Every structure is written in structure tokens, then in C-alpha cells.
Amino acid sequence: MHEPKRHKITVLGAGAWGTAVAIALASRHDVLLWGRNPAQMATLEAARENTDYLAGYPLPPALRVTADFEQACTHVTGASADEAPLLIAACPVAGLRPLMQQLKERPIPNVVWLCKGFEYETGLLPHQVVREVLGNAVPSAVLSGPSFAQEVARGLPCALTVASDSAALRERVVSAVHGGSIRVYACDDMVGVEVGGAVKNILAIATGASDGLGLGLNARAALITRGLAEITRLGIALGAKPATFMGLTGMGDLILTCTGDLSRNRRVGLALAQGKPLETIVAELGHVAEGVPCAKAVRELAKKLGVDMPITNAVAGVLFDGVSASAMASQLLARDPRNELA
Ligand SMILES: NC(=O)c1ccc[n+]([C@@H]2O[C@H](COP(=O)([O-])OP(=O)(O)OC[C@H]3O[C@@H](n4cnc5c(N)ncnc54)[C@H](O)[C@@H]3O)[C@@H](O)[C@H]2O)c1
Ligand SMILES: O=P(O)(O)OC[C@H](O)CO
């Protein structure tokens, strides 16, 4: 039986996902939500709602918010071991390195990140970025899986996976997050969990484009299935465990993001099918769509590693090389036949 315990938690990043996670945890724990924009945080406090990133979901009275980074850090660095502190980084991949640099000289107890992607400039996974900046001494974990912020903020059921090579941190994350309508599973395959979370966003763009072109449900199922093969090939080349890709952060998140209209990445694909330019799509979205920078990073990484990733290459062609969505579909169909399990 899961023993509920009260934790001191700081969530760094007040976008859609950081806000939803803070809302979900605030009824059980002492949670402080930090955002880097003082004006936005003042509005959030006044309205008790994140109108910029998660409109329509009131903050519970127990949830405290701040734009003061010092206060956000002290909430966990000043906590006793008995208060089992947890530091959660809820920024996009592009913000992870700067955020870790801000934390570098502080005695943080641990760090758990929620972002999904490869660092654009370096092609590194989030755990590699964190270790490059903080070293190996700080226990670190990734929390990922099929989870739309709006549903989590509403308290609807959801299952996530925490991956870490620290058994103690895995236990702490399960202790803090598992409960209510959230189930948390644990594993030690950080590479597999991060690769699944990153590449599914590219495939959601592909599926959105296919659906936007009206190519049908058969095409959608084909893209999801062959997309999973593509994710698995890259993951194995990077040292992941193949079984991870059949789990929540592989197949689970891939299905959700490719089929759920709440997905920003899927919406990018739907808009590409209408022929909209990428700059317009990104501006209209107003939120991060990690699949866009990730497509470029993964195309380069796969080329370097000699991993065949035709759907990723096709998506990158539409995003960055001026290929139309319909030409992308034709190019994928025209590829030579291959053995399904190769
Ligand atoms: N929204 C979801 O449903 C969801 C679910 C699971 C995972 N995620 C992942 O979580 C990450 C964040 O997504 P989101 O939905 O919150 O994005 P968002 O666009 O809603 O918000 C991004 C937030 O990050 C902040 N930010 C950007 N750079 C920062 C930095 N250097 N330091 C601090 N804050 C910074 C922005 O100010 C903004 O508040 C992404 O990697 C996304 O893939 C999102
Ligand atoms: O809205 P998206 O496409 O960034 O997807 C959100 C989550 O990653 C789904 O698990």
C-alpha cells in the first residue's frame, strides 16, 4: 500500500505543464511554483489562474507562487531530510541548460525534469545536459509519459514513468507524485524514457499533417507503428532498453500525442497540411512545440549514427526545407519495401 507522505516541492517553470503539475500536487504537498517573468507571476497570483498558459484551471488555495528564484530554491534547500524535498524543472528543453546553470552553485537535494526533446545545439538528451552542468553528484531523474496538462489540471487519471539511476530518488518521486488520480511507475532507463518522449513529438507532427491532408485512419496507424520502429532504432543505438519503448513513455505517449487534439505538436502538423508557414504556426500556437527543434536535432543525430529515420527526415524536410506536406506523404510511400522487423 502506498504510504502518503508530505513533501516540500518547488516547481521551476510556470508554463502549462509546470502549472498543471503544481496544481495536481498542491493538495497533498507544500508546493511553491516559480516563474521567471515577474509580471506574469503577479497576474497569476492576482487571478489565481495561469491565464497565459493554462486558462480555465484555478490554482488551489494551498498553491503558493513566486517570481523570486532565491525563495524558490530556499524552499527545498532549506528543507530538512524529514520534509523529503523535491526540485522539479518544468521548462522546455531550450531552457534546461540555463536553468541548471542558475542552480549550479546551490546545495540542491535533487532535480527532476519534465521536458521532452534533445538539446537543439548539441544533440544531447536532457540527462546529459543536466550532468554536464551539475555533475554526477546531484541525484537526477526524468518524469515523463502520456500527460496533457489540461487533463492533469482537471484531476483526470494519468500514468507516468520516473527514470533515474538513483533508487532513492525514484522512490522519492513515486512517494511524492503517485497518488490521487496519478499513477507513477519507475525504471532505470533514462535514455529510453527520454528518447521516447522526444521523438514522439516529431511523429505527432507527421500524424497531424497526415490527418490534416485527409489521408485516413489507416495512414495514421501506419505512421504511429512505423514511428515506434523508428524511435526504437534510435533508442537502441543510444543504449536504451528496447522494452522501454513498449511502455508509457514510448508507445503510450506516442499514441496520445499522435491522436489527441490537445497536442501542440499534432496541431503543428494539422496547420502544415493547410500550407501555413512555420513562423505563422509557431506564432499562433503561443506555446512550445518541442517536435520542431527536435526534428532538426534528431535528423542530424540519426545521420551521424547511421540510423534510418525516414518519417523524422520527412517531417524535417517539411519544417525546414520547403517540402509540402503532400509531397512528404508521397515521398514516404515511394520508399523501397523493407523487412518489417529489420
Ligand atoms: N503541456 C503539456 O501537456 C506537457 C506535458 C508533458 C510534458 N511537457 C513538456 O514540458 C516542457 C514544458 O512545456 P509547457 O507545456 O509547460 O510549455 P509552455 O510553452 O506552456 O511554457 C513554457 C514555460 O517555460 C518557461 N521557460 C522557458 N525557458 C525557461 C528558462 N530558461 N527558465 C525558466 N523558465 C523557462 C516559459 O517562460 C514558459 O512559462 C516541454 O518540454 C513539454 O514537452 C508538456
Ligand atoms: O502538447 P504536446 O504535443 O507538447 O504534448 C504534450 C505531452 O507531451 C503529451 O504527453
Image (spheres, rainbow, N blue to C red):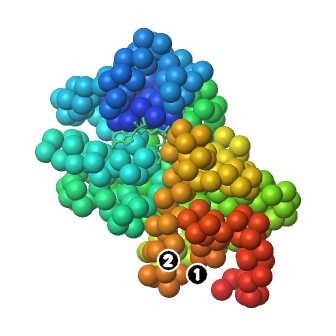
Q: Residue at x 39, y 60 (%)?
A: 119
Viewer-closest of 289 and 249 = 289
* Residue 263 visible somewhere in the drawing: yes
Residue 118: quadrant of the picture: bottom left
Q: Is residue 290 above or below residue 51?
A: below
Identify the secondary structure beneath mark 1. Answer: loop
The disc, 2 or 1, on the residue closer to the chain's N-terminal end is: 2
The disc placed on residue 308 is: 1
- Mark 2 and mark 1: span between their CA atoms? 7 Å
| Residue type beneath disc 1 | Asp
Contact? badges 2 and 1 (CB < 8 Å): yes
Side of 95 where 270 appears, left or right:
right
Q: Is residue 37 above or below residue 27?
A: below
Q: Residue 17 at x, y = what percent?
A: 49, 37
* Residue 247 visible somewhere in the drawing: no
Binning the other alpha carbons within 10 Å of mark 2 as few (below 14), some (14 to 19) or many (20 upward) gives some
Q: Residue 323 at x, y = what percent?
A: 66, 69
Q: Residue at x 21, y 43 (%)?
A: 102
Residue 260: quadrant of the picture: top right
Q: Residue 65 at x, y = what percent?
A: 36, 21
Side of 304 where 69 appears, left or right:
left
